[in-house]
Image (spheres, rainbow, N blue to C red):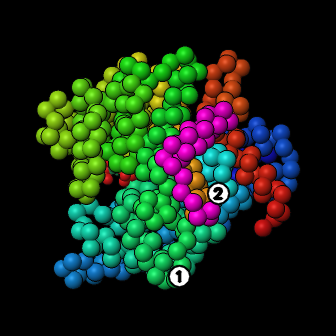
Amino acid sequence: MDLNNIMNDLVKKHPGEDEYLQAVREVLESIESVVNQNPQLETAGIIERIVEPDRVLTFKIPWVDDSGEVHVNLGYRVQFNNAIGPYKGGLRFHPSVNLSILKFLGFEQIFKNALTTLPMGGGKGGSDFNPKGKSDTEIMRFCQAFMLELVKIIGPETDVPAGDIGVGGKEIGYLYGMYKKLQREHTGVLTGKGTGWGGSLIRPEATGFGTVYFAQEMLKTKGETFEGKTVAVSGFGNVAWGATIKVNELGGKVVTLSGPDGFVHDPDGISGEKIEYMLELRASNQDIVAPYADEFESATFYPNKRPWQVEVDVALPCATQNELDGNDAKTLVDNGCICVAEGANMPSTPEGIEVLQKSGVLFGPGKAVNAGGVATSGLEMTQNSMKLAWTREEVDAKLHHIMVSIHDACVKHGMKDDGSVDYVKGANVAGFLKVANAMLDQGII
Ligand code: NDP
Ligand code: 2IT
């Protein structure tokens, strides 16, 4: 089967949707041999059906700011694939949000969710609303206005949104409040809820913890651990925070954080009160990481630069898509980096991935590495259904187990003749096979 034809058709149908096309291309390149070995996939049109979302809801969100001015933002929910469970995936509030970005994220989410071993389909949503500088009441009114539309297509057995960039516990609370009022029911329709009203313990930490658990397994394949390793983290949000905590616990030293304004280098390591300060920085809604270097004199701020120029053993990109390119990858390799594990979604460009893989650096793609966030969302859904709450230790043990099993799946499907592991291929093939087999069983729908 010629996957190039499918890709070319998609490029014609969706011109300019670069991030979406980038994500599809990477998966199709990885699964080519599996598709050729399984002709029933072609007969059932699996590839043509899996690359298009089931449906996309777009809507406008009018809201009023504190000074009485009216604003109109765009809102979206992409319901991509529900072959193995209800649509599941986060909401992103960021000015850069557009359909291409949400389709790329929704597409990745299908395979990521399949890897978790839990019954969740793929979806994503969000808005071009910019939370930067907004007051709490403005964020509340915006979330309420957003839910007035989103409510029409979500439900605990249909589609279960969660957080992503710009959407954390606070926003989930406001969204949930409006859903509950409109539907007159208290159900697990969103994950990442407050732990006093249905949220799972460990969910805030889960993506970062899972990222480091996965990287730990990658390092193990080379007889290495985090003990004594220097680590570059990008971003300073939810994922960066969780990853920094766990690297510290495992004896490693995080020496960088970054924001859209540049990065900070703290050679003394980001631990203790400095990790607490990350939460303050994030809550300030100011969109900049620079104040860290004013607060802690061991740190230096580098405006408009990325953290990949710092000499480290391990790099954990935890900010956003396409933040680590071919040149960054080359610098990391030249500086002796042995492992890059993606806490963010698609942070490395295709050129970046190629440089890392060709240089023998352990490279873990986001859909495997950062699956701990949505996996713990799945555990939150389970607890909500059972009307039970598990302890921190129980959830953490399940998260750890899931990350090890995702690593095993990547090794199983990505092992190369020379004994090294192509984690990109492993993750794509394992995730794809699970969803494709479910689609085969369920007929042409
Ligand atoms: P947050 O909003 O908590 O943090 C995002 C971080 O990235 C912030 O520090 C943000 O700064 C920074 N950032 C945004 N744009 C840029 C940029 N262009 N350059 C450098 N830094 C930037 O989001 P999350 O931590 O939740 O998400 C981070 C990544 O992890 C995203 O790719 C997301 O899709 C992915 N992810 C998140 C999961 C979750 O459970 N939250 C699960 C799996 C993946 P600022 O806000 O100041 O712009
Ligand atoms: O990209 C992701 O996996 C997330 N933002 C988390 C999604 C979720 O439903 O928990």
| Helix, strand or loop at mark 1 | helix
Say what amino acid the circle numbered 2 marks: Met
Decide whether residue 391 is among the magenta residues: yes
Residue 258, percent from left and from top: 30, 41
Which dot marks residue 183? Answer: 1
In-front residue for pair 241/272: 272
Residue 83, image quadrant: bottom right
Q: Which amino acid type is marked by label 1?
A: Gln
305 vs 121, left or right, is left
Mark 2 crowdedness (10 Å alpha carbons): few <14, some 14-19, many ≥20? many
Secondary structure, magenta segment, majority class: helix
Q: Which residues are magenta?
A: 385-410
Is 138 rendered above or below residue 7?
below
Q: CA distance from mark 1 to mark 2?
A: 23 Å
User: Horizontal and vertical percent for residue 294?
Assistant: 13, 40
In the displayed structure, 141 sits above or below 10; it is: below
The reply to whether residue 399 is visible in this rendering is no
Q: Which residue is mark 2?
A: 120
Q: Residue at x 45, y 66 (%)?
A: 197
Q: Residue at x 64, y 69 (%)?
A: 157
**Element at badge 2?**
loop
Image quarter where the N terminus lies is top right
Residue 353 in the image: above or below residue 119: above
On the image, the x and y values in percent for residue 372 come to 53, 45
Question: Residue 144: x percent and y percent?
Answer: 39, 77
Q: Earlier in the sequence, mark 1 or mark 2?
A: 2
Q: Is the CB atom of the residue marked by disc 2 within 8 angstroms of ligand 2's nearest atom?
A: yes
The mark closer to the camera, 1 or 2, is 1
Label 1 Cα crowd, 10 Å radius (few <14 / some 14-19 / many 20+) = few
Q: Nearer the viewer, residue 17 or 79?
A: 79
Quarter where residue 142 is shown: bottom left
